[in-house]
Image (cartoon, rainbow, N blue to C red):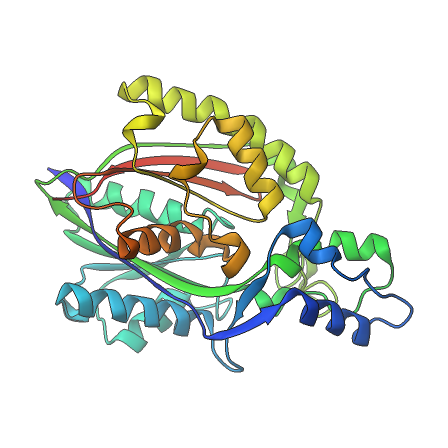
């Protein structure tokens, strides 16, 4: 028995924000500091980002993607055995956002959250697969909703703080969902994860946690050293991917698609250089959709399926890169 991908879906809020609009807002809200025109585009390669509507929550984005997926699969929410919300964002500290998503879908199954920065969704898939293989569940819905636009620092004191806040200017809002099912058909056939937790403070949102509970407003913005983060992640990519290919007896040419987390165009170029993955096997979403955090991998697969770039019987690789630092590799064959 295998765990097959029964479907995938993404939801992108229609409102778009261009880099010039971001620079204008920073200028308006930052007395004494004005970013150089075109600086954000030059540093990130991102043209537009999606923005959730006022009052729209991470659970709304996840529920929208999940509802679309279930409808396309001809399933009702009552036919889901377990719902996992796997995201860097959340509606509340407590309870788990999975409860909110389930309520919006009308599901009554067990639920829980999985959180590991931008690798949250891939880890959610990892957990779901293990639980299905254990026999506890037959059909698991893994979903995510990201509202990264809510943790952006707009009032910047100087260039140093602007650079420290740059990760926030790449963020985009989105929702995604994937259905995993027990099946005799081919499915997930390889998974490997690693971490370098000594780098946990390279990128963070300090507020709203126990360490900064008393000052969530001042510390509620994403900050980090993008160069150090990428250098740390790059060290883990090639060895893990090479090991995965060696253990499975496969080559890069055997895959129709490599879905890799995308935080910026320069970072994607570094990934191509260090991984040996051909550029034509990527689905480049970063320029038009921004950094959608944990939605990145399912969004890429969804777009590839819609455009016919991959289909039944194709092998797909998922490569997750996240703050923490975490790296993950999952191989799957799409069911015929």
Quadrant, the N terminus: top left
Instruction: In the displayed orientation, state which residue is furthest to the left.
Output: 184
- Residue 335, position in %: x, y? 15, 44
In terms of depth relative to the viewer, which is nearer, 158 or 220?
158
Residue 263: percent from left, percent from top: 56, 49
Q: Is residue 259 visible?
A: yes
The image quarter containing residue 161 is bottom right
21 sits to left or right of 311:
right
Q: Which percent across, then down, holds residue 12?
A: 42, 68
Left or right of 222? Residue 112 is left
Figure quadrant of the C terminus: top left
Q: Nearer the viewer, residue 94 or 266?
A: 266
Q: Residue at x 21, y 70 (%)?
A: 108
The structure residue drawn at horizontal position 19% and vertical position 70%, both measured from the top left corner, is 71
Q: Residue at x 38, y 38 (%)?
A: 281
- The answer to whether residue 223 is visible is no
Q: Is residue 13 positioned above or below 197 on the image?
A: below
What residue lies at 25% left-to-right and 62% top-to-bottom?
A: 110
Coordinates of residue 88 in the picture (x, y in percent): 50, 57
Q: Nearer the viewer, residue 135 or 247?
A: 247
Judged left or right of residue 262, residue 127 is left
């Amino acid at each position: 028995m295998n765990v097959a991908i029964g479907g995938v879906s993404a939801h992108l809020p229609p409102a778009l924000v261009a880099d010039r609009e971001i620079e204008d807002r920073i200028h308006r809200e930052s007395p004494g500091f004005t970013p150089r025109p075109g600086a954000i585009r030059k540093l990130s390669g991102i043209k537009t980002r999606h923005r959730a509507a006022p009052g729209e929550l991470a659970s709304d984005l996840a529920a929208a993607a999940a509802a679309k997926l279930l409808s396309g699969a001809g399933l009702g929410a009552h036919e889901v055995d377990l719902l996992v919300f796997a995201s860097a964002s959340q509606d509340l500290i407590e309870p788990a956002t999975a409860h909110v998503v389930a309520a919006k879908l009308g599901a009554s199954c067990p639920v829980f959250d999985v959180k590991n920065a931008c690798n949250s969704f891939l880890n959610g898939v990892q957990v779901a697969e293990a639980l299905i293989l254990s026999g506890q569940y037959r059909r698991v819905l893994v979903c995510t909703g990201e509202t990264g636009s809510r943790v952006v620092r707009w009032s910047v004191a100087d260039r140093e703080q602007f650079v420290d806040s740059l990760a926030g200017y790449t963020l985009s809002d989105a929702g995604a969902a994937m259905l995993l099912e027990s099946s005799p058909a081919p499915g997930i056939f390889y998974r490997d994860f690693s971490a370098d937790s000594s780098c946990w403070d390279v990128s963070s949102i300090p507020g709203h946690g126990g360490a900064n509970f008393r000052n969530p407003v001042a510390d509620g913005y994403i900050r980090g050293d993008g160069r150090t983060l990428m250098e740390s992640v790059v060290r883990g990519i090639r060895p893990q991917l090479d090991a995965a290919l060696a253990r499975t007896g496969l080559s890069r040419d055997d895959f129709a698609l490599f879905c890799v987390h995308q935080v910026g165009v320069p970072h994607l170029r570094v990934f191509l250089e260090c991984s040996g993955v051909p550029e034509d096997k990527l689905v480049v979403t970063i320029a038009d959709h921004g950094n959608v955090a944990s939605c990145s991998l399912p969004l890429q697969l969804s777009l590839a399926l819609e455009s016919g770039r991959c289909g039944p019987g194709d092998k797909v690789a998922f490569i997750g890169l996240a703050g923490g630092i975490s790296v993950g590799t999952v191989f799957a064959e799409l069911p015929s």
